[in-house]
Image (tube, helix red, strand yellow):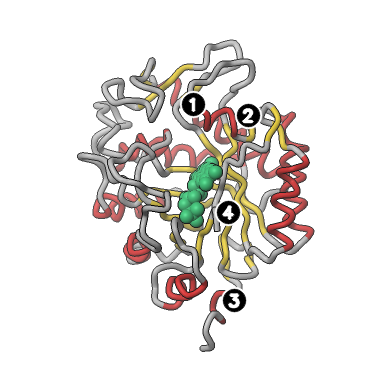
């Protein structure tokens, strides 16, 4: 096969055909206005769809109300919102801009460190376990999720998925990586719960599997992609062996593709900046591929066509994820 040819072949995520193997990873570009989509972010996506990218991921889109609050962490402020129906027309502009140029679109549903059930509640930092910091810059969590609150979170994901479908996105992504809330439940580092949401792999995966069940219940025809840190690089956290155990458990609840990254933001080593060697984490995706038949793609510091070609021709992934490049 001629060099680079495989990169130009289509592939399929849950019945959605993607015209080539290039995925633009989600980026909170902060080109939003009080969580609403702006002209500049629509242009940003349209330019990249025009440029030929196969799948463009909008990220992130917050599932819990952040209006009129003073969040402690900037990821929450720079994100798009998807917790209210008033966001749908703006989100639809992104999906339309991708479709117009033959690209497919995904939206990343996000819950970081702060959460509230309704706009009548205070936005507070949450965690699976109160003895582990909520995340970088946030400090110790004010609250540990109760089971009743987890049930509300799950419903919020379902409502967000409905809005994603109404906006015309092709694929829904659940962010379960880099130490945000879903990953904090998955990880042995941050989840010390003793109820059915902690302990065994099944229990640590329960928040995610309940979210998947709810998303599929609300949007039965929408493909779902999960982004996961296959080694979370945290002391006592999930190593690749843990992830290989988790993947089949999670997949029973319907996952159409896996986006593989590494680390928590607060990991004791760089996880995404320029100090990270090129292609540092592609082997994690290769290992994930040993336990799933669904498409898998690595991301992080994949910056050259030769490395992209290596990924898809030498079994590291079915596609390549790139953000800054
Ligand atoms: C400005 C910026 C914002 C980002 N926001 C998100 C995000 O909201 N969700 C996410 O999963 N990853 C986010 N990322 C991480 C990227 O998806 C990607 O994993 C990271 O940039 C490494 O890939 P790269 O070397 O191709 O840039 C962001 C990255 C950048 C540079």
Q: Is residue 140 left or right of residue 168?
A: left
Looking at the image, is 163 positioned above or below residue 295?
Answer: above
Closer to the camera in the image, 43 or 158: 43
Which of the marked residues, 2 or 4, is nearer the chain's N terminus? 2
Q: Secondary structure at mark 3?
A: loop
CB under 8 Å between callouts 2 and 3?
no
Which of disc 4 and disc 3 is earlier in sequence? 3
1 or 4: tag closer to the N-terminus:
1
Distance from Cα at disc 1 to Cα at disc 2: 18 Å
Q: Nearer the viewer, residue 134 or 30?
A: 30
Q: Residue tagged by mark 4?
A: 223
- Quadrant for the C terminus in the image: bottom right
The correct choice, above or below, for 65 with respect to 29 in the image is above
Residue located farthest toward the front when viewing the structure as drawn: 275
* Percent position of residue 133, x then y: 32, 25
* Residue that lies at the very extreme toward the bottom in this rendered image: 1
Q: Which residue is depicted at the point 74% across and 46% down?
A: 42
| Mark 2, secondary structure of its residue | loop
Q: Residue 293 is drawn in which quadrant?
A: bottom left
Question: In the orientation shown, which residue stands out farthest toward the left?
Answer: 236
Badge 1 element: loop
Question: Which residue was labeled with disc 1?
Answer: 73
Residue 106, can we see it? Answer: yes
Q: CA distance from mark 1 to mark 3?
A: 40 Å
Q: Which residue lies at the image location 43% right of the left edge and 43% below the top edge? A: 176
Disc 1 + disc 2, Cβ < 8 Å = no
Q: Secondary structure at mark 4?
A: loop
Q: Position of residue 279 (x, y in %)?
A: 39, 63
Query: Can you identify the residue that label 3 sits on?
Result: 9
Query: Pointer 2: what residue?
Result: 83
């Amino acid at each position: 096969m001629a060099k680079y040819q495989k990169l130009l072949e289509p592939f399929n995520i849950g019945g959605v055909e993607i015209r080539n193997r290039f995925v633009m990873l989600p980026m909170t570009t902060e080109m939003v206005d009080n969580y609403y989509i702006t002209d500049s972010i629509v242009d940003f996506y349209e330019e990249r769809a025009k440029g030929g990218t196969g799948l463009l991921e909008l990220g992130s889109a917050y599932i819990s109300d952040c209006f009129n609050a003073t969040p402690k962490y900037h990821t929450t402020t720079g994100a798009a919102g998807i917790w209210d129906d008033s966001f749908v027309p703006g989100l639809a502009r992104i999906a339309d801009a991708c479709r117009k140029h033959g690209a497919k679109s995904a939206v990343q549903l996000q819950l970081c460190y702060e959460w509230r059930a309704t706009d009548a509640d205070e936005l507070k930092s949450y965690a699976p376990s109160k003895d582990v910091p909520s995340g970088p810059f946030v400090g110790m969590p004010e609250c540990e999720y109760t089971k009743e609150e987890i049930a509300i979170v799950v419903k919020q994901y379902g409502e967000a998925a409905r809005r994603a479908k109404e906006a015309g996105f092709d694929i829904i992504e659940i962010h379960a990586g880099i130490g945000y809330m879903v990953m904090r439940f998955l990880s042995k580092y941050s989840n010390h719960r003793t109820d059915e949401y902690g302990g065994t792999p099944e229990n640590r995966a329960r928040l995610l599997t309940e979210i998947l069940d709810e998303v599929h219940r609300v949007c039965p025809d929408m493909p779902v992609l999960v982004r996961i840190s296959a080694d979370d690089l945290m002391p006592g956290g999930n190593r690749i062996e843990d992830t290989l155990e988790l993947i089949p458990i999670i997949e029973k609840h319907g996952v159409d593709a896996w986006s593989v990254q590494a680390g928590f933001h607060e990991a004791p080593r760089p996880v995404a900046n320029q100090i990270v060697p090129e292609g540092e984490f592609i082997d994690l995706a290769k290992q994930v591929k040993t336990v799933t038949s669904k498409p898998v793609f690595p991301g992080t510091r994949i910056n050259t066509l030769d490395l992209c070609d290596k990924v898809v021709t030498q079994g590291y992934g079915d596609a390549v994820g790139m953000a800054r490049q």
